[in-house]
Amino acid sequence: MTEPVILADVVRSGFVEGHHHGSVVVTNPDGSVAWAAGVVDQPMFPRSSNKPMQALGMLRNGLTLDGKLLALAGASHSGEQIHLDGVREILAMAGTDETALRTPEAYPLADPARDAWVRAGHGPERITMNCSGKHAAMLLTCYVNGWSFDDYRAPDHPLQKVIRTAIEDSAGENASYVAVDGCGAPIFALSLAGLARSFGHFAAAAPGTLEARVKDAYRSFPEYASGTTRDEAALMRGVDGLFCKAGAEGVYAVGLADGRGIALKIEDGAARPRQVVMAAVLQRLGFTDGVVERQLRFPLYGGGVDVGAVQPHLPAFS
C-alpha cells in the first residue's frame, strides 16, 4: 500500500532533527494526475480548502456577493477589523446579526488581531471564529431561498445538499464520507487528486462563470480570503493567475492559470511545512517568483536567533 513520504526536513544548526511526512499531487488541465507522491487516491478531508467549492454552491443558489465579500465568504480569515466589518455587512444583508451565527466561539486566528481583541476587553466570540464569513454567507443564502436558519449546518439541510453537489462537481468524484468540520458545518471527504483537480478547474475558469467569480474574488482581495499578513495572500499577490486556499490538518491546494492543480496534506497535521512544500512544488514547476523563494523555508529559532528551518524534501518528479 502506498504510504505518505517525507516532504520536509526539520534542520536545526545543521542537524536534521526530524521530518514531516505527507502526500502531494499535481494534476493536468484535463484533471488527470501528472505527478504524485504518497497517498493521493484515497479519501481525506479537505478541511477549509473546500471553501471555494462551498462558495460555488451558494452562488449557484442565489448568493449575490462579489469582490471582497465573496472572498470573505470563502475565507479562513484572521479576525482583523476588515473581516469583522465584512461579516457584519453580509449578516445585515440577510436581515440578521452575529447572534444567528452557529460558529463556535473563538479568538481571532492571527496573533496580532487576537492580542488587539483581548486588549479591547473582548473574549472569544462567534464572529471572530475564522469561518464566520462562510457562515454569514450561508445564512444569506438561506435568506434568499427562504430556508431555515437554526439548522443550516445540518447535512440534510437544503443548503448543505447544494454545497455537496458543488464540491462533487468540482472534484469530479463523489464525496465518500461526511463528518463535522471544526466550525460545525459538514465536511465531505475527497481524494487529494480530486481536490487538486477542483482548484485547477477554478483557476482556469472562463470569465463570467461562477467559478471565475470565486477565483477573481480571491485574487483581487487576498487579504479578505485569508489575512493581510498571511502566506496565502502573499502567494496570490506574487504569482500571476495563482489561486490558493489552505486548510486545517496540513492541507493546502493551489490552482494555476493554465488549469493545473496542486494539493498536499501533511500527515501529522502541522501547518509549518505546508507553505514550504507548496513553494518547492511550484519551484519544480518553473515558478521562480521571489515570494516562492521566500516561502521555501520556515525559520527555526534558538535564543532569539534564526538557527535553522523547516525545508523541503521532495521526491523526484516522475
Image (cartoon, rainbow, N blue to C red):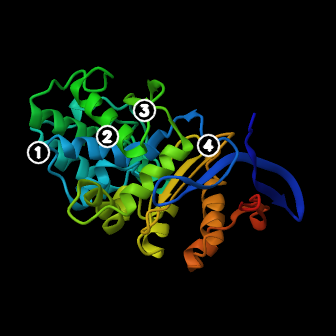
Q: Earlier in the sequence, mark 3 or mark 2?
A: 2
Tell me the amino acid under the disc marked 3. Asn
Find disc 3 in the rendering and name its residue.
174
The answer to whether residue 29 is left or right of residue 85 is right
| SS class, disc 1 | helix
Residue 290 position in % (x across, y down): 58, 79
Image coordinates of residue 275 in percent, x first then y, are 60, 59
* Mark 2 residue element: helix
Residue 47 left/right relative to 142: right
Query: Of label 4 and label 3, which has the lower sequence position?
Result: 4
* Residue depicted at 11% across the width and 45% down the height: 93
**Mark 4 is on which residue type?**
Val
Identify the residue under disc 2: 166
* Circle 1: residue type: Met
Q: Are marks 4 and 3 in contact (CB under 8 Å)?
A: no
Q: What mark, if any, has residue 93 been given in the picture?
A: 1
Residue 230 can be seen, yes or no: no
